[in-house]
């Protein structure tokens, strides 16, 4: 005989109490770990360890919870336990409600100290100066390509990449009124305006498109003018008291952005191997025929897969370029170490931007 609603709720309440007890046991153990780490002077945050915990749980998961939900739940559990040791101060492109803030919360969990910044340069400065422990910046979008300013800043910064996260971007048209009538100006970050170009041309062809520092800033400005609208997240709509006049206006239904987590090496050294890792580097080669082909040869020789290859002008006036490369693997693996060693000998400039666990 099937259970009625009240009986099911009683069982759920009982399980919730058990869960709370078990979670508090975990938190108590985390406190003990924190005391040992403080005595040893070791790090609180270990991204490779947290990645392994989630990977192991996803392998053991038999449902009905989806693996993505398992990852979300355990990130929050680990975030809450980590905060008992020391909450992380995380810088990101502000104000509240940006996708960068969402990326920070997705990677670190909700128990962080927020350090919203006016632009990407300030995010890097905050993490480099110690005002924040970590920074989170977008580096790549699957429709608009790389985020140039982030790559340029990584080139000369003392910060390195220790983690990444990515998610589908859903752009919404936000304004004080629920309709799309009489919109004079649409405000958003230049990348968001580009990602919604087709929709805007079709539905708001006469509206001015005005670039601002972030999508959340566009939403904030739209909250002060009935003729303006912003392109931003659902979170930004709630943050600034706006209606969603149109849902999911991005041209690509699978619009996805990848974010890098950055910090000083003394804050966190390169994470140890997690089993699913990436090495990001930037190189330049002598300006001679076949030079670009030559730097790919060590990767083939040692069986290392390349997942990204982007070029950026070196701004030397000599038509020279920097090449940003992502490789699968970890430098502790012999074949990866050998490929990196051979590659470095061929380069006029060589810098490892980071080694870190890859996001799912």
Image (cartoon, rainbow, N blue to C red):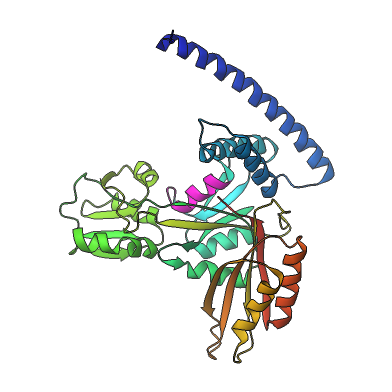
Check the image and name the residue furthest to the top. 1
The reply to whether residue 51 is in sight is yes
Residue 22: name its quadrant.
Answer: top right
Note whether 293 is above or below 119 in the view shown. Answer: below
Q: Quadrant of the N terminus?
A: top left
Could you tell me what secondary structure mostly forms the magenta stretch?
A: helix
What residue do we see at 75% from left, 37% from top?
34
Residue placed farthest to the right in the image? 40
Relative side of 282 to 239, left or right:
right
Q: Is residue 260 above or below residue 174?
A: below
Q: Quadrant of residue 297?
A: bottom right
Q: Is residue 71 left or right of residue 350?
A: left
The residue sitting at the left extreme is 182
Q: At which x and y percent is residue 86?
A: 68, 41
Q: Residue at x 38, y 46 (%)?
A: 236
Magenta-colored span: 96-107
Q: From the viewer's perspective, is residue 106 above or below residue 263? A: above
Q: Residue at x 59, y 36 (%)?
A: 74
Q: Is residue 106 magenta?
A: yes
Q: Position of residue 84 (x, y in %)?
A: 67, 35
Q: Magenta span has 153?
A: no
Q: On screen, 353 above or below 244?
A: below
Tally the numbered discs: 0
Percent coordinates x, y for residue 134 in the rendering: 62, 54
- Determine which quarter of the picture holds residue 262: bottom right
Left or right of 242? Residue 18 is right
Left or right of 4? Residue 73 is right
The one of 142 and 108 positioned closer to us in this rendering: 142
Residue 105 locus on image (x, y percent): 53, 45
The residue nearer to you, when weighing 114 against 304, is 304
Task: Specify whether residue 132 is in view.
Answer: no
């Amino acid at each position: 005989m099937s259970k009625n609603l009240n009986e099911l709720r009683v069982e759920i309440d009982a399980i919730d109490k058990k869960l709370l007890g078990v979670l508090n046991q975990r938190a108590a153990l985390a406190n003990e770990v924190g005391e040992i780490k403080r005595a040893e002077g070791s790090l609180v945050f270990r991204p490779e360890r947290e990645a392994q915990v989630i990977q192991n749980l996803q392998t053991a998961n038999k449902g009905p919870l989806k693996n993505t939900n398992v990852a979300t739940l355990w990130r929050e559990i680990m975030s809450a336990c980590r905060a008992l040791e020391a909450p992380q101060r995380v810088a990101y492109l502000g104000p509240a409600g940006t996708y960068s803030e969402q990326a920070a919360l997705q990677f670190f969990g909700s128990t962080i100290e927020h350090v919203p910044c006016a632009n990407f340069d300030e995010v890097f400065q905050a993490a480099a100066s110690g005002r924040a422990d970590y920074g989170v910046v977008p580096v790549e979008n699957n429709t608009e390509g790389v985020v140039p300013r982030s790559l340029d800043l990584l080139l000369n910064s003392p910060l390195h990449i220790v983690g990444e996260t990515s998610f589908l971007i859903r752009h919404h048209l936000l304004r004080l009124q629920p309709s799309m009538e009489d919109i004079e100006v649409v405000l958003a970050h230049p990348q968001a305006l580009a990602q919604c170009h087709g929709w805007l041309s079709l539905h708001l062809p006469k509206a001015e498109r005005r670039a601002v520092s972030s999508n959340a800033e566009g939403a904030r400005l739209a909250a002060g003018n009935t003729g303006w609208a912003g392109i931003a997240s659902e979170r930004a709509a709630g943050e600034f008291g706006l209606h969603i006049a149109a849902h999911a206006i991005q041209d690509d239904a699978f619009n996805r952005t990848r974010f890098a987590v950055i910090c000083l090496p003394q804050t966190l050294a390169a994470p140890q191997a997690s089993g699913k890792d990436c090495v990001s580097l930037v190189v330049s080669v002598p300006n001679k025929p076949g030079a670009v082909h030559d730097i790919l040869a060590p990767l083939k020789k040692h069986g290392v897969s390349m997942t990204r290859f982007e070029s950026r002008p070196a701004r030397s006036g000599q038509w020279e370029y920097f090449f940003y490369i992502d490789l699968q693997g970890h430098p502790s693996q012999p074949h990866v170490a050998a490929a990196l060693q051979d590659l470095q000998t061929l380069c006029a400039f060589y810098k490892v931007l980071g080694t870190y666990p890859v996001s799912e």
